[in-house]
């Protein structure tokens, strides 16, 4: 009877603990106060930085795991930090996502790395259970590696887009200079060039044109472009256009000079890259081609010595 009572007490305590844990989990999954109130305030202007009520989930999977994924993405953001730097790099990469969306992508990449490491780790752990702890640490390292790889990918996207902007800049600047020299105003020339060009720099200029059409002053729109850009050339280009619009200074000569400067800078960069590659090209020559040439040169003589010498 005593054992039965003890078992009943232990079972009741365990059941109460499970009930408390489930209650805490369910309460944490409830929508926040802001999310519950915002649907009734849709007609009011939203303050910058305030999260908008999320759209309805498009699938059962998103409805079940969406809150958990968004919560985990918020945890990743709090652990890593640097939201301002991420926001600037997203703008420079030309991605139409928010910082929270990027954190969700980081979480997905991390889960992908974790799953990739977990499959062979589970097979190894099934055969050798004593290796379970090191394998679990390996899976956690794979998760962290996936998160960091997404951040490195964002940096690579920024670099690739800036390279495309530098390649497009001379052509866009020359087109703007021709349009201005033909009698167009800066905004009219910008509209004409944007309508007939495609690319990363054209997308930035299209964004400036959209800001101007929605009521932003022209100088302020170009100043925003200069602040968004991570390239000094593009920043000088935007500042020059802003000054030309504000003060009415000649713009065609400035644009021609900037295009020539960018072409000269690209030529110097190409020469410097070729000089660096010249050293790298010596590696296969020295360690691959040269030993083969030496073998072909000395092997017949070595065979001849073996044949002559008794």
Image (cartoon, rainbow, N blue to C red):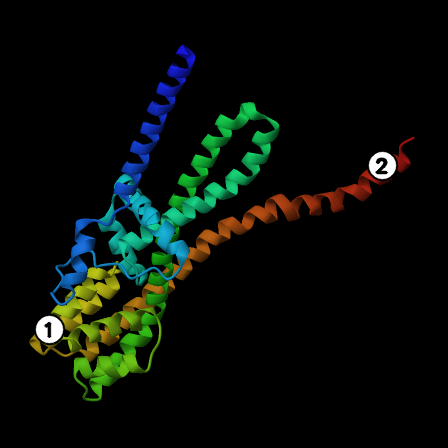
Q: Give the residue displayed 51% in from the left and 43% down from the top.
A: 116
Q: Quadrant of residue 216?
A: bottom left
Q: Is residue 79 left or right of residue 141?
A: left
User: Looking at the image, which residue sits at the far right?
Assistant: 310
Between 284 and 296, the residue placed more toward the observer is 284
Q: How many marks?
A: 2
User: At 13% across and 68% down in the image, what residue appears?
Assistant: 43
SS for dot 2: helix
Q: Is residue 76 left or right of residue 211?
A: right
For the C terminus, the quadrant is top right
- Does 185 sit above or below residue 155? below
* Rendered image quadrant of residue 179: bottom left
Residue 252 picture location, percent across and down: 20, 79
Residue 213 can be seen in this image: yes
Within 10 Å of the Cα at label 1, are there few (<14), some (14-19), or many (20+) other Cα atoms? few
Q: Residue furthest left?
A: 247
- Look at the numbered disc 1 and give the secondary structure of its residue: loop
Residue 304 position in % (x across, y down) = 86, 40
State the mark number for residue 305. 2
Note whether residue 50 is visible: no
Q: Residues within 10 Å of mark 2 (few under 14, many from 20)?
A: few
Q: Nearer the viewer, mark 1 or mark 2?
A: 1
Task: Find the residue positioned furthest to the top.
Answer: 2
Of the two numbered discs 1 and 2 on the same chain, state the one appearing first in sequence.
1
**In terms of image quadrants, where is residue 308?**
top right
Placement of the N terminus among the 4 image quadrants: top left
Up/down of 282 relative to 190, above or below: above
Seen at 21% across and 85% down, the residue is 181
> What mark, if any, has residue 217 been given in the picture?
1
- Relative depth, front residue between 2 and 195: 2
């Amino acid at each position: 009877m005593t054992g039965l009572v003890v078992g009943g007490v232990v079972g009741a305590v365990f059941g109460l603990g499970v009930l408390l844990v489930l209650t805490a989990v369910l309460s944490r999954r409830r929508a926040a106060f802001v999310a519950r109130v915002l649907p009734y305030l849709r007609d009011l202007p939203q303050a910058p930085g305030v999260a908008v009520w999320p759209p309805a989930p498009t699938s059962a999977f998103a409805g079940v795991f969406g809150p958990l994924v968004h919560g985990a993405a918020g945890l990743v953001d709090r652990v890593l930090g640097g939201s301002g730097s991420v926001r600037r790099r997203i703008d420079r990469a030309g991605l139409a996502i928010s910082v929270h969306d990027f954190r969700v992508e980081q979480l997905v990449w991390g889960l992908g790395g974790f799953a990739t490491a977990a499959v062979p780790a589970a097979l190894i752990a099934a055969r050798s259970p004593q290796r379970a702890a090191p394998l679990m640490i390996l899976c956690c390292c794979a998760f962290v590696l996936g998160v960091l790889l997404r951040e490195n990918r964002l940096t690579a996207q920024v670099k690739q887009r800036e390279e495309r902007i530098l390649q497009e800049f001379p052509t866009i600047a020359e087109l703007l200079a021709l349009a201005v020299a033909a009698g167009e105003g800066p905004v009219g020339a910008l509209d004409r060039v944007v309508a007939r060009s495609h690319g990363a720099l054209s997308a930035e200029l299209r964004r400036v044109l959209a800001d101007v059409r929605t009521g932003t002053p022209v100088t302020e729109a170009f100043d925003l472009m200069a602040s968004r850009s991570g390239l000094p050339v593009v920043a000088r280009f935007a500042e020059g256009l802003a000054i030309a619009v504000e003060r009415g200074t000649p713009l065609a000569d400035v644009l021609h000079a900037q295009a020539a400067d960018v072409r000269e800078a690209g030529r110097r960069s190409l020469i410097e890259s070729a000089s660096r590659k010249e050293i790298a090209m010596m590696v296969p020559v020295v360690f691959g081609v040269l030993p083969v040439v030496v073998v072909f040169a000395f092997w017949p003589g070595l065979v001849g010595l073996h044949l002559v010498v008794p």
